[in-house]
Amino acid sequence: MEGIKKVFTTELEPYISELKEVMLKKGYSNCQIQTYSKIWNNMISYATNQPEQEFTENFRQKFLQDVYSESLERRDSMYRITRAINMFSDFTQFHVIFRQYCTSKSAFSEELKDIFLRFLEEESQRNFAENTMKSLRTRLFRFHDYLYDTGIRDFKDISGQTINTYILSLARFSTTYVSETLREIRRMLKWAFDNQYIDAQLEEFIPHVKNLRQQKIPSTFTISEIEQILNSVDRANPIGKRNYAIFIMAARLGMRSSDIRTLTFSNIDWDTKVISFSQKKTGRSLTLPMPDDVGWAIIDYLKNGRPETDVKNIFVSHIYPYGELTSLGKIIPQQMRKAGLKAPVNKRIGMHAFRHGLATRMLENDVPLPVISQTLGHADIESTEIYLRVSLKQLSKCGLEVDL
């Protein structure tokens, strides 16, 4: 298999010029190109201080850390910036621009659409869920874009080298994405051979990649970090009262943000001090005891912070007409900055870090995994075992003696 191409910082400018020309030909608007160009120009300026350095993942991460650390804490900025860097990296390595989004209206090329659409029709007979079919279509679009941008207009022109190089382009993705993508392409190539679209059994070039569940170590907050965040909230104003109640629920109970957002008055039994709800992610019912500090935080918000509205949810938007909260994604990065905490540049930290922090603390206090699993509402204990990887106390029990 051909290796990764070496690109040096002195070569960035000509690559960027060529990339913008290709984007224009592909129909990208001037506004889109200008948006990405600002990021690429900053990268060129940054690279002038580091001449003849190889343009590697380490260089990219250092550039993001030094230039865009605060911007990456905002979700909209993070996607735009990382999209620009990934697009440039893909272009330098494979001379391909992969589409970021593939909607139901996205079209395959005239030359290749017949085989892709026929295969998708074949897959639809397997009674996949609608979202599964959307994911499948998106993965096939990426493969299609690679083929088309590398000059392939006929499936019979695909070779083993074509497949090998495409696999290299998946290097930055999770094993889950890679495993599912390669499995689908393997099925497509086998189907293409069986239906005489190609003359060789190219599926043999596709390796079997084991899908490693929960391969990433989860982001967590320590006890001191949680206290820093809670103490930094301005509880003298309505939004501060709301956010404080949300934070403390996530920290003390480990509730997912989706369940906190949709929590209604009927979910709380004040007499027995319990919160009962159906989890949005799993659909499983969960009942949790309500600590006093959580209860008083909710009461403070309801009495002194929540605007008048007919919305049944406890926590609402504070922008008229005071509807349901649609997302909690931005409030944690904002509060972390106020608390003086910084997130790693290559890792987005959100409400889930409270949940992960609770699980880790329970594990370090020798709470059995089944109890932690039940508290977090996990569908199976395998989802809970990931926290073994962030608990130093538990990991120390797995150490082996080494003869010297």
Image (cartoon, grey):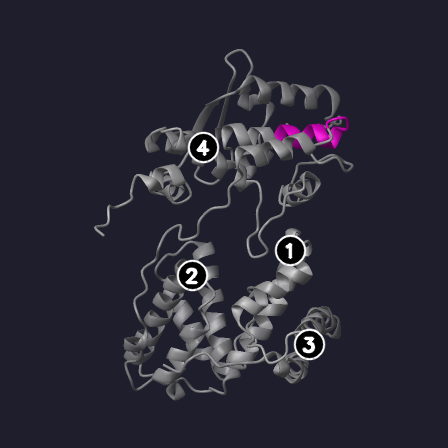
Dot 3: what SS?
helix
Which circle marks residue 48 in the picture?
3
Viewer-side residue, 268 vs 311: 268
Disc 4/disc 3 C-alpha distance (Å)? 45 Å
Residue 313 seen in render: no
> In the figure, is residue 67 to the left or right of 204?
right
Dot 4: within a 10 Å radius of its alpha carbon, few (fewer than 14), some, or many (20 or more) residues?
Answer: some
Viewer-side residue, 4 vs 83: 4
Which circle marks residue 72 in the picture?
1
Q: Which residue does the image show at 47% across and 34% down from the upper left?
A: 279
The answer to which image quadrant residue 325 occupies is top right
> In the figure, is residue 391 to the left or right of 224?
left
Dot 1: within a 10 Å radius of its alpha carbon, few (fewer than 14), some, or many (20 or more) residues?
Answer: many
Marks 3 and 1, the one that precedes in the sequence: 3
Marks 4 and 2, the one that precedes in the sequence: 2
Magenta highlight range: 235-246
Q: Nearer the viewer, mark 1 or mark 4?
A: 4
Name the kind of residue labelled 1 in the image.
Answer: Leu
Which circle marks residue 177 in the picture?
2
Dot 2: what SS?
helix
Q: Is residue 233 above or below residue 26?
A: above
Q: Nearer the viewer, mark 4 or mark 3?
A: 3
Which circle marks residue 87 in the picture?
none
Marks 1 and 4, the one that precedes in the sequence: 1
Residue 398 drawn at (x, y percent): 29, 42
Disc 1/disc 4 C-alpha distance (Å)? 28 Å
Which circle marks residue 361 in the picture?
4
Disc 3/disc 2 C-alpha distance (Å)? 35 Å
Viewer-side residue, 224 vs 132: 224
Disc 4/disc 2 C-alpha distance (Å)? 30 Å
Q: Nearer the viewer, mark 1 or mark 2?
A: 1
